[in-house]
Amino acid sequence: MLKVYLVEDDPLVAQHVLDTLNEAPGIRCVGHANRLGIARIDLPQCRPDVLLSDLGLPDGDGTELIGELSHAPAIDGVWHPHILVFSVFGDEARVIQAIEAGADGYFLKGCTSEELVRAVEQAARGESPISPAIARHLLKRFREDGFSDTSFRDSGFSEFGSGGGDTGMMDLDEPSRRDHEVSAREHEVLRLVAQGYVSEEIAERLLTTPSAVATAVRNVYRKLQLGQRARATVQAQSRPGWA
């Protein structure tokens, strides 16, 4: 049984999400909080597989919780939730901030019940569900960083394999310039997601597997997070007293 914990302060939205997920086969909501403070207390006890969180909450920004969970060690060396943002905020700054903080996926409110269930299931499998509008923000971000549609370098993760969903995942321990550069294939997947194609359709168009497509999207998220780490390191090194 897939366990989900919801952080959402709007009671109508929360009830709709809880009903939708509890009615889905194989999914159970194990808790709900309308405040970050409540979620911080509940999560270590509930230990959900997926945290589904809004961003705009009465006692803070959901990005704070995402960052805390993403950088905290696993409880008992085992539990660490997959984090899926479910928010009305679709502006580029909020999207990038949440992903860089460690979100595994980002879906906009207004999606269908079927799309929400699918996104939760994808997150639980270690994939990175993403709304088309969010994919467009990511494409824009990479272009602003100096990458054109034809200038993405091969970072060693560009070619799709036929193996499982973990194929091509990178080591996050040592960020480098190559590690956070998006490959041409990853860019192509993102472009197709932005056009509204789902994983199975993208796999068919690119002659690969849905799991390889999922890995490509996951890599894009990870590279954004690596890029943020690298920028933070450079900023820290430029400050007086850096050792």
Image: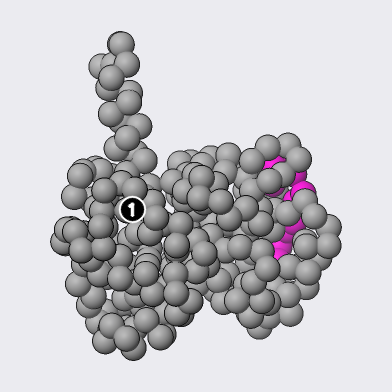
| Image: 164 above or below 69 | below
Q: Position of residue 243 (x, y in %)?
A: 25, 17
Residue 151 sits in quarter: bottom left
Q: Which residue, given by chain and number where applicable, does mark 1 sit on?
A: 142
Span of residues in magenta: 29-39
Q: Nearer the viewer, residue 210 or 22?
A: 210
Q: Is residue 53 visible to us here?
A: no
Residue 155 falls left or right of residue 112: left
How many badges with numbers are in the image? 1
Residue 48 belongs to magenta span: no
129 or 120, which lies in front? Answer: 129
Whole-percent x, y for residue 197 in the image: 45, 79
Image point 35% across, 32% down: which residue?
232
Looking at the rendered structure, the secondary structure element under dot 1 is helix
Q: Mark 1: which amino acid?
A: Phe
Q: Is residue 33 magenta?
A: yes
73 to 212, vertically: above or below:
above
Label 1 Cα neighbours within 10 Å, binned few <14 / some 14-19 / many ≥20? some
Query: Residue 136: image x %, image y %?
Result: 45, 62
Which of 243 and 42 lies nearest the eye of the viewer? Answer: 243
Q: What residue is at 45 percent from the left and 41 percent from the top?
A: 71
Quadrant, the N terminus = bottom right
The color scheme shown is: one colour
Determine the residue positioned at 37% across, 67% down.
190
Identity of the residue drawn at 26% across and 63% down: 149
Left or right side of 87 for 180: left
Is residue 149 positioned above or below 118 on the image? above
| Residue 107 position by quadrant | bottom right
Residue 39: x percent and y percent? Answer: 69, 46
